[in-house]
Image: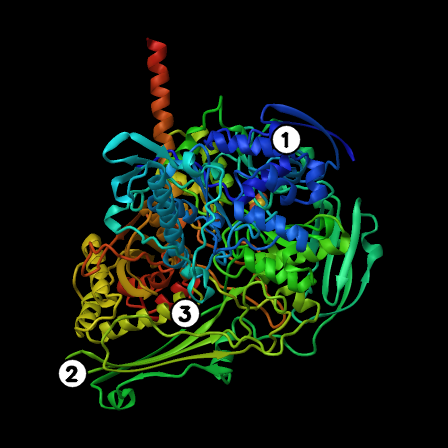
Amino acid sequence: MSGANSNPTRSASAIARSLKEGRSHQKTNAFTNIPKQVEEVLEKWNTATSRRNFLKSSGLLVVSFSAAPLVSTAAAEAAAAAQAAGGPYPDPDFHQLDSWIVIHEDNTAAFYVGKTDLGQGTGTAFRQMMSDELDIPFDKTTCIMGTTNLTVDQGGSGGSDAIQVDGWPMRRVAAEARRILLDMASKRFGVPVDDLTVNDGVITVKADPTKKITYGELIGGKKFNVALTAANNNIDNTTGVAKVKPVQQLNMVGKSPQRDDIPRKVDGSGTWAVDVKLPGMVHARNVKPPVAGAKLISIDESSVRNIPGLVKVVSKGNYVAVVCEREEHAIQAARQLKVNWEKPATAAFPTSDDLFKFMRNATPTSKRQPNVVGNPDAALASAAKVVEAEYEMPFQGHTAISPAHALADPSNGQMTIYSNDMKSYGLRNGVSQFLEIPRDRVRVIWMDGPQAYGRTAADDAGFEAAFLAKEIGRPVRVQWMRNEETAWDTKGPAFTFKVRGALDTQGNLVALDFNARAADYNHLGYNEADTVLIAQLMGRRRAMPAPGNSDIPSDMYAIPNRRMVAEVVSLPTIWETPLRTGNLRDPNGPQVTFAAESFIDEMAAAAEADPLQFRMKLLNASTTDDNGFRRARSIAVLKTAAETFGWDTRPSPKRPGNGTILPGRGVAYTYRGQTVLAVIAEVEVNRKTGHVWVKRLVCAHDCGLIINPEALRRSVEGGMLHSLSRALYEEVKFDGEKVTSVDWITHPTLTHLDAPAKIDVLLVNGDPNPNRPDLPHYGAGEASLKPTIAAVANAIYDATGVRLRRVPFRNARVLEALKAAGV
Amino acid sequence: MSNVTLKVNGKSHTLDIDASTPLLYILRNDLGLRGPRFGCGLGQCGACTVIINGVATRSCITPVSTVKSEVTTLEGIAKNGKLHPVQQAWIDEQVPQCGFCQNGQIMTAKALLDKNTNPTDTQIREAMAKTLCRCFTYYRVQLAIKRAARAIASLGSNRSKEVVA
Ligand code: FES
Ligand code: FES
């Protein structure tokens, strides 16, 4: 992998951390190669603001003036104005160029963006895009992310939109800064802009190269004072006058500089949200209801009286927490506290074994308008062959490697939350509403944390920390325990599917009737003051629970008759339950694509056709395309994947031989938004144990213009293996009243033993005009999860002739199916 | 409470602490170390791994009273301002996604390579089997371990050349 030895992205957390920690006694960055000037500003900042001062002023106010060069000037000014008028943390104004870009005297630049990087390297990608538009060397830039009072509100992360959506305003504002700087130089030298060139942050008069000036000399330490516009007042539309560059003129975009967050994650120098310590800080642990819907009757506080350093037992409604001076004592107190709970009279939900029966018998709470093409009923009635199948996907959790956590500091009438929540702005808004603290007195400092692929319990922990901090009047750090995280974190919804398909006499797929049903009623949004767990436990209820979502397949197949129905069902208990659903890395895509692409394989088998050719035929059966050229690009990814894999064209299944190990291969294809991809899995099924090893994965992936190919490859690999974990292991188990998956034994996950021997990620550009100068960049964070489960199921079918229609494919289930089929 | 003396990354510390406290909390909260992290507290995930006597040890289930030898944490494996070859391999291979588990991946891999400089694929998988990653970087971790093994081997051969010279 090529790449500069890059400078780190300084997340705002990095700034906060250096404030907090007195860097003198901590060589935190021996290997991270922070640019010297940043170091210096941080040192100055630190000495100028003693810890006591910092605490007194609770943060950025005092600081932002002594450290003006590093903090976006518009943010600092807004803070100054607000201090006079209201709270210390007003929003940076996204209509001001100064809120996005600061150029320093030494000709370096800091980019302030309202996104968070969950470990896919988006922070590095933003620097690549913005340094290209600004024409400043990549390694002279830093990127500050996701701190609510320093960076404009781009919503944090979610929906794989960082590059696809938020990348555009970033590119445009950087282009605008370049335009302004050229204008300034033109005035300075008295020549038209066209007579100037700019290279690496230095503007030169073409006719007289001795006349040159750096960006830093032009504006370093000063403000642009340039207003931007944004149609509909939508930050995504933010723009200046300048146009972005054509793709061909981008230099860093398409290269693979090393991710700037990796050194600190490898040498132990990073400070994560779990690491922050504040003077006077105490530790909290929750005491969760033992069963869903339990009601608190009484607490016997004498049961924890012997715990050293017990600060307080806090309870409100059914929310209970203990707070201690030391962490291990808080853990002990939470275990020891005697609480008298009353169980609800009726079962909160079916058992996990009965779930799918329950779902099939339930009356839907909502139904999307069926998506109908042609006349599927007539086509099914007159077909040469009809195939029917039902599929099942259980609840699956985020189950982060670290339980949820947050630290909240309530000093001086403000609230600062240190969190890894991917939507720091939403957390700020939600906490402000929940605790009735004005929004400009709440800020969230986003920091590194465990994976946050959607709506995780990081939201819940942020609210809990803030609530407890307000109660106690000291900084409170709250962390969930493993059993809480696995049992109570939000879940991706369970699905049942009913699918029918019809073949004509030539083996063409002429009808598809697809019904997807999700247990997703009361789906949680992000950081909602009336749905976070603590609010639910305190008895808050919103009048209208969210209807939830189900989904239909994403493909470009030409099937003349189709009906696709997506419906939602509800479990009996929807509040104060561990079976609460929220977005999990492409909320419904992996489930729906498992059923859809398994079924296409079943139809191919029924037609005795090669499964890849069967798909190609469905894509080629039409000649029209959409404006994202998804049909053409679908064909391109399938072709590329097949060629790289060395696909041998033949129908599935292969005749299983006599050996213990049965080899097979399977393909699946889909799109997510504008990103199109195909995955081929090669498996070995152990006939004696039922064990499935996915020996090889090939993914052909087209997400348009690629910013950082190596970072993208790894993100795609991680996504495929996440999906593989969901295919082989993951299932949330529960009895009628509680979740019984509580640790890594009762909730197994993919391990090193399952890693494929080989993974190929092929980055495809299937655009019919691949060199067009306006080639867009699409999202890539989640697409690779969608087709992987189906590719594995199809490969198992190819190997054994046994079709698995229920996820996960753990050994016992596979073995049972093999035995039943006499394999 | 009792006085406990701990040697960590070359430095001795005396702490007045309950001797049954798991080592992890003392490393993190009393000594301010950030490499070892809480993932499960049950010995199941490896996020809290440190090296004691050459053995990758789960500090979340190790009472401090049982620690009789020096503890090495992620912060302690670089030498003279130079990253350990395992850490360098992690950067070269761009292993981490979120990175939360990577302390466990790196420390477990280092303990493996300290004992076996040229592990087979199967030995790597087995040594790493219980070190979990929920961003699923396993494939890259395994490539990085092989890369580190090559780097260590070439360091070794350079050293022996120097000795010969
Ligand atoms: S935290 Fe120690 S093994 Fe998980
Ligand atoms: S890198 Fe995120 S858990 Fe391993």
Sooner in the amino-acid sequence: mark 1 or mark 2: 1
Identify the residue under disc 1: A47
Name the residue tied to disc 2: A505
Q: Residue furthest top?
A: B165
The chain that hosts pointer 2 is A
The type of residue carrying mark 2 is: Thr
Disc number lying in front (3 or 1): 1
Given the image, what chain letter belongs to the residue carrying mark 3? A
Residue type of the residue flagged with mark 3: Arg
Q: What residue type is labelled 1?
A: Thr
Relative to A122, A46 lies left or right: right
Earlier in the chain: of badge 3 and badge 1, it is 1
Density class for disc 2 (Cα within 10 Å; few <14, some 14-19, many ≥20) is few
Q: Are marks 1 and 2 on the same chain?
A: yes
Q: Is residue A331 above or below residue A664?
A: above
Labelled disc at residue A806: 3
Which image quadrant for residue A46? top right
In the displayed structure, would residue A496 be above or below residue A732? Answer: below
Q: In which quarter of the image is the C terminus of chain A?
A: bottom left
